[in-house]
Amino acid sequence: MSLSNQLRAIFDAERALREAETELLQAEPRELEGLLSQAVREAQAERDPDEAELRLTRLADLCAQVPGDAMADALITILDSEHPGVRVQAGDALLDTAYDRYAEVARAVERALERGEDGPSMQELPLILAEVGEPSALPLISRFLSHRNEEVVASGIDALTRLGDPQAVPLLKKLQNDPRVVTVTVEEADEEFTSTVGELASEAIDELSE
């Protein structure tokens, strides 16, 4: 196949994808919830890592376009993927969903906390809540401070700092003597360093008290 024909094939495939997606999303929301939730479970069980990544990436985009609590749960499940690219897609999808339908995401976060989830999603969710910055974010993010995983606690501290609400200070003071060691990533400088939970809490208190 010539290069021009290959390019034309890509355009045709993209057009077909958009048409199929438009038709799919016209289905009844409840039916879509069941279909997409099942597809997420099947993608998780897929043995071919490339196929799993392909499906989960597409499913993250689809789930974000369908209202309903089950879709918010599915996005959190996708956010636990072992594929970094999938997690980025799911995080962006959850953020977009939270801006449009915050209550659905908040309820899904509460359910994840109640189930005692401990995957990568639990380190991302507090930051997503902080970025949206709804009034209920403070009490919801504060629940991450009592998580058994110290890395999740550290993410909760970071999220409260980003939220910038001084009302978080009393909550953070309870962690000032926490000796657990965590790894902190400074994305801007592409660096990592270790710190204790207590040190992070004290730094957050100082910042929020300024």
Image (tube, rainbow, N blue to C red):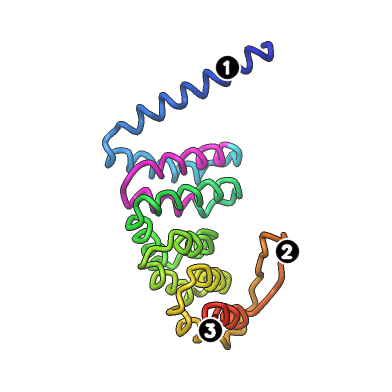
- Position of 71 compared to 194: left or right? left
Kind of residue at badge 2 = Glu
The residue singled out by tag 2 in the image is 191
The residue singled out by tag 3 in the image is 175
Cα–Cα span, label 1 and label 3: 57 Å
- Position of 69 compared to 168: left or right? left
Q: Residues within 10 Å of mark 2 (few under 14, many from 20)?
A: few
Q: Residues within 10 Å of mark 1 (few under 14, many from 20)?
A: few
Q: State the residue lying farthest toward the front.
A: 210
Q: Quadrant of the C terminus?
A: bottom right
Q: Position of residue 19 (x, y in %)?
A: 41, 24
Kind of residue at badge 3 = Leu
- Position of 29 compared to 175: left or right? left
Q: Quadrant of the N terminus?
A: top right
Q: Earlier in the sequence, mark 1 or mark 3?
A: 1
Instruction: Look at the magenta stretch and give its main secondary structure.
Output: helix
Q: Which residues lie in the magenta part?
A: 51-78
Q: Which mark is residue 48?
A: none
Q: Is residue 57 above or below residue 153?
A: above
Q: Earlier in the sequence, mark 1 or mark 2?
A: 1
Magenta-colored stretch includes residue 68 = yes
Residue at 36 percent of width and 67 percent of height: 135
Residue at 46 percent of width and 78 percent of height: 166
The residue singled out by tag 1 in the image is 9
Cα–Cα span, label 1 and label 2: 42 Å
Cα–Cα span, label 3 and label 2: 24 Å
- Disc number lying in front (1 or 2): 2
SS assignment at label 1: helix
